[in-house]
Image (spheres, rainbow, N blue to C red):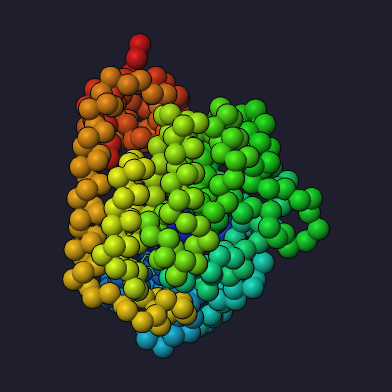
Amino acid sequence: MAMRKKFYIETLGCAMNVRDSEHIVAELTQKEGYEPTETLEEADLILINTCSVREKPVNKLFSEIGVFNKRKKEGAKIGVCGCTASHLGEEIIKRAPFVDFVLGARNVSKITKVLHTPKAVEVDIDYDESQYAFADFRSSPYKAYVNISIGCDKQCTFCIVPHTRGEEVSIPAELIVSEARRAARRGAKEIFLLGQNVNNYGRRFSGEHPRMNFTDLLKAVSEIEEVERIRFTSPHPLHMDDAFLQEFATNPKICKSMHMPLQSGSTRILKAMKRGYTKEWFLDRAAKLREMVPDVSISTDIIVAFPGETDEDFEDTMDVLERVRFEQVFSFKYSPRPLTPAQNYADQIPDEIGSERLSRLQARHGEILDEMKADRIGQVHEVYFEELRPGGMVAGRSDNNMLIQVEGSEELLGKTVPVKITEAGRTSHRGAVVA
Ligand code: 5AD
Ligand code: SF4
């Protein structure tokens, strides 16, 4: 029997990219006869699924594919996929002529085409993949990512995503529900709904479809009997209306962790970012959430040193950090991106000031996490176990998204079990199964 061709894939960036990679893997294995390898040198096809949200990963891309080119076996192909592929397009082949094809973030299903077209560049951001008529693959048997929309209609002035993933199109609810049902029946009790802006769901479909908003979609997915847990990312604070918070709070299948990307605590900066909400609105939504769901964990994204950010604006961000006491913070120094309005704003902030603000924010957040630690010890949480860890440990997540490890074996995988926290850390905890 002929040896199957092998591919190696590296995935950077967000959950959308992880899901896109799963689709690419599905197409390659089911339609092109490939099998995966973890060893670059034996791959016939090397893929990198890129992120372009900040500048660093873009620079890393070119050094990385250079290394791939040196290490690859004779005749192996290199493909650049994802968001950086979308916005740089053929520029990539100009800068790195050994690249065989470029496949944009909204063109995943064309992987089988570009594979056979020398120097192909497929980066059309109007291309409609919302019907998902392509092969399916899941990297975890316990959890299923399900796309609910593609693209993003927000015009946040710092963000390149609308240029890499295009206009927002919602995937028809029947498709989402049937995909979730199929995955849950195969054992993925946790469904993770994905979109750039999930709670704007239903704004636009590509064909005639019954209207449905995100709150109703959550209800529909929770009605699938085999689904035990529902998570989603990312919601937008602007669209956190009362009906949505109510559904979040009262639907027992919806996991009690909410991502609320703040970006800035200053209303003035939020306006310059075109975020559409104020500091007060954000604080009101977070307070309401904490009141309705006392055990909720709230995570956020924060950008420091956006153009024009004064010390006073930054203090507003610190103030929100203090008041909301997020369980998790992803914080970034503003990075000017091509095709975005903010790159041309006056008052770009010097790098040293950005670094200072970032370290102050991260240090304070670290202290807040330390302050929270003591309360965690002795708490009992329902943990859904998903992964074996070295040293005889098994890891899973509590309903409110804490990463918890216990001693154990495969037997725990795919099960939801009460666990008492015995040692609390900043980002993960240890516990013991409650007998
Ligand atoms: N600079 C820094 N951070 C950014 N993000 C998006 N664009 C930029 C940028 N130009 C951050 C935002 C977003 C997260 C995914 O990345 O906080 O929520
Ligand atoms: Fe995801 Fe945005 Fe990065 Fe694209 S640019 S991979 S959408 S985070």
Please say if 283 is above or below 311: above
Residue 122 in which image quadrant: bottom right
Q: Is residue 54 visible?
A: yes
In the image, 148 versus 213, the foreground residue is 213
The picture places residue 182, in percent across and down from the top left corner, at 64, 39
Report whether 199 appears left or right of 392. right
Which quadrant would the C terminus be assigned to in this image? Answer: top left
Ligand 1 quadrant assignment: bottom left
Please say if 140 is above or below 30: above
- Which residue is painted at 42% across and 76% down in the image? 342
Report whether 363 appears left or right of 333. left
Residue 257 in which image quadrant: top left
The picture places residue 70, in percent across and down from the top left corner, at 28, 76
- Which residue is painted at 67% across and 67% down in the image? 128
- Which residue is painted at 72% across and 48% down in the image? 212
Residue 13 in which image quadrant: bottom left
